Image (cartoon, rainbow, N blue to C red):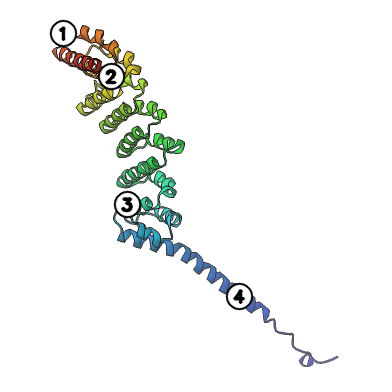
Amino acid sequence: MPEPADQPAPPLRTWRPMILWTAGILLALGLAWSIAAVAVPYFQVRAAVMRSTAFTPDAAEMERLGGPEATVRKVSFYLRLPSRLAPNRGGTLGLLWASGKPAVPVLFKLLGDEDEHVRIGAAELLTDELRKHAGNEAVELLIAALKNDCAGVRIRVADRLGELGDPRAVGPLIIALKDKDEGVRNFAARSLGRLGDARAVEPLISALKDKDNGVSEAAEHALIDIASPQTLEALLMGLKAPEGRVRAAVANALGYSADMRAVEPLIAALRDQDGTVRRCAAEALKKLQGEEAGK
């Protein structure tokens, strides 16, 4: 039996440290790649924000970030970071503006941002962008934004809905006539006037009694815009309102209706107990008679 010292030594297992070394290198590379994938877009956007001015389109910066879709992707990541790591969040709005339609989903999310200035800026850019691409999605997004917590957002949305000319906005805008913010009520009335839908006449007549003079004036102008043969019946009901202010505004609007069926009710309004109503009725009759004579 051979002595232990004479036995051959076991082969060294050199493959184990090689595998561990290789795995360590791959792990380090993967970690470095992950850090770079996060850090590079972060610093790119941060630098672009520092160079850009909030709410100002900056196509040059967008190109540096890799084009519209890459810009939206990187900015979206930047905005998900805490504000202490992602300062000057409003500065990203110019980059999103320059990105065009791909930025719409991000802008819509920003309507819920913690910073009110960012929300208002996002609403401004979003409504402008959606106006360029008016359609079902645009109207639905804007109608949903009418429920935003920020009055500034609701004001801008109420204004833009009148420009899109979609009848689906009439109902939500009628509801907005009772918004707690007078600015929202004001722009809702204006937009209803632009849309010219007969459904808005009665709510606008009610808005003539609003405690805010700006809202009541906007409602009066909206009734003038909306006056037509199609809305005549609804307008005539306003001549029976108990408030002289309402009757006067309706009489004034009837002068723009171009419908001679309004003549007799306006003649009756010449005997109204309120002098302003009588004056508005007389002026309305002159407008109607002038239009009839011009035919």
From this view, report whether residue 8 is shown above or below residue 204. Answer: below
Mark 3 or mark 2: which comes first in sequence? 3
Crowd rating for badge 4 (residues with CA inside 10 Å; few <14, some 14–19, many 20+): few
The residue under label 3 is 90
Q: Where is residue 36 in the image (x, y as percent from the top left)?
A: 46, 66
> Relative to residue 38, is residue 278 drawn left or right?
left
Q: Where is residue 157 in the image (x, y as percent from the top left)?
A: 34, 37
The residue under label 4 is 22
Mark 4 or mark 1: which comes first in sequence? 4
As measured in the structure, the alpha-carbon distance from the residue carrying label 4 to the one carrying label 2 is 79 Å
Q: In which quarter of the image is residue 112?
A: top left
Residue extending farthest right: 1
As measured in the structure, the alpha-carbon distance from the residue carrying label 3 to the one carrying label 1 is 56 Å
Q: Which of marks 4 and 1 is in front?
A: 1
Mark identifier at residue 205: 2
Please report contact status of discs 1 and 2: CB closer than 8 Å, yes or no. no
Mark 3 or mark 1: which comes first in sequence? 3
Q: Name the residue located 33 percent from the left edge and 15 percent from the top edge.
A: 234
Amino acid type at mark 4:
Thr
